[in-house]
Image (cartoon, rainbow, N blue to C red):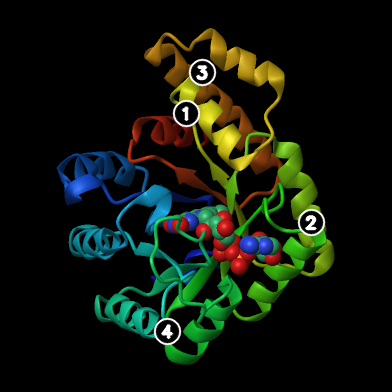
Amino acid sequence: MKLSEIYKNNDKLIFSFEVFPPKNANTESLFAELAKMNEQKPALISVTYGAGGSNRNLSLEIVKELKNHLKQPVMPHFTCVCSSRKYIEKYIQEIEELGITNILALRGDEPQDIDVCYRDFKSALDLIEYLKKHSELEFAVAAYPEKHPKAKTFDDDINVLYKKQNLGAKVAYTQVFFDNECFYKFYDLCHKKGIKIPIIPGIMPITSFNQLKRIVELSGTKIDSKVLAYFEKYKDSKEDTIKAGIEFATLQCEKLIDFGAKGMHFYTLNKAQSSVEVIKNIT
Ligand code: FAD
């Protein structure tokens, strides 16, 4: 099913799960987790590409395997930074040959450990222009409620999202955030600018205090000091942290639904339990 059908005016909340290619293509435990996720009938499963240093080739292998085994649409992420036009052409062709219909079109971050960095595609907009001209794929894009860390201004970011929409993006998924106020402000600014595509909040139920600290450090996402202290209290108990993470994400989602969010994109880190519990709580 194409993104435009998935997100067409629909009164039901639309959930998607993001997974990453497991190391050594060991898919056994991933499939066990996906089976649990699938009980919630997600609209799609998205698969990251080269994120956090994972092997880019592995991504295509996993996409292939998921496509063959899952009923839900599989949406590969794809980043264009540093790749040659030839490589991008081949990758997109392979994706289409698998029968994939949607892709998350990204610029990506320049890898540190790369010998040759091609400058054929400089931003997500270049990739989107390419997809429009040379493929039948529908594309989703990334959005940043707290501003992309390298963007000069918020307006720059919103202008980029506006351009992505005008070039045909069907939906935007946001970077993970923990402070809903950031999303509300961002959403209102997007609305004023004329962005009408669904902007789907990225939700990550916390499962470990160290993981939370790392995300806050790496992405600079805002988190209330009281919330941080709340999770710190449970840091020595995995079970209590998971429970607190589910409670926090449930409350966050309930408020987002009241605000009018059309769905949620769950950053699952390949574990189903927390996202599944949150969905059960809010539906
Ligand atoms: P663009 O849309 O090209 O840029 C986004 C915004 O940041 C624009 O406003 C742009 O002006 C500004 N910007 C970006 N870079 C610069 C710069 N150098 N200088 C000034 N301004 C800049 N990464 C992966 O590697 N693999 C993944 O699978 C992956 N999945 C993601 C999924 C989601 C939902 C999101 C939100 C992000 C994901 N990322 C992933 C991270 C993403 O690749 C980075 O955030 C990247 O830096 C920007 O990609 P983009 O497509 O948003 O870029």
Q: Nearer the viewer, mark 3 or mark 2?
A: 2
* Residue beneath the point at 37% across and 43% down: 40
Q: Nearer the viewer, mark 2 or mark 4?
A: 4
Q: Which residue is mark 2?
A: 154
Q: Which residue is mark 3?
A: 244
Relative placement, left or right, of 21 versus 255 is: left
Q: Which mark is residue 40?
A: none
Q: Secondary structure at mark 2?
A: helix
Can you tell which quarter of the image residue 44 is in? bottom left
Whether residue 10 is visible, yes or no, is no
Q: Which residue is mark 4?
A: 85
Q: Earlier in the sequence, mark 2 or mark 1?
A: 2
Q: Secondary structure at mark 4?
A: helix
Label 1 neighbourhood size at 10 Å, few (<14), some (14-19), many (20+)? few
Q: CA distance from mark 2 to mark 4?
A: 30 Å
Label 4 neighbourhood size at 10 Å, few (<14), some (14-19), many (20+)? some
* Residue beneath the point at 43% across and 8% down: 236
Circle 1: residue type: Gln
Does residue 183 sit above or below 170 in this rendering?
above
The N terminus sits in image quarter: bottom left
Q: Which residue is mark 1?
A: 211
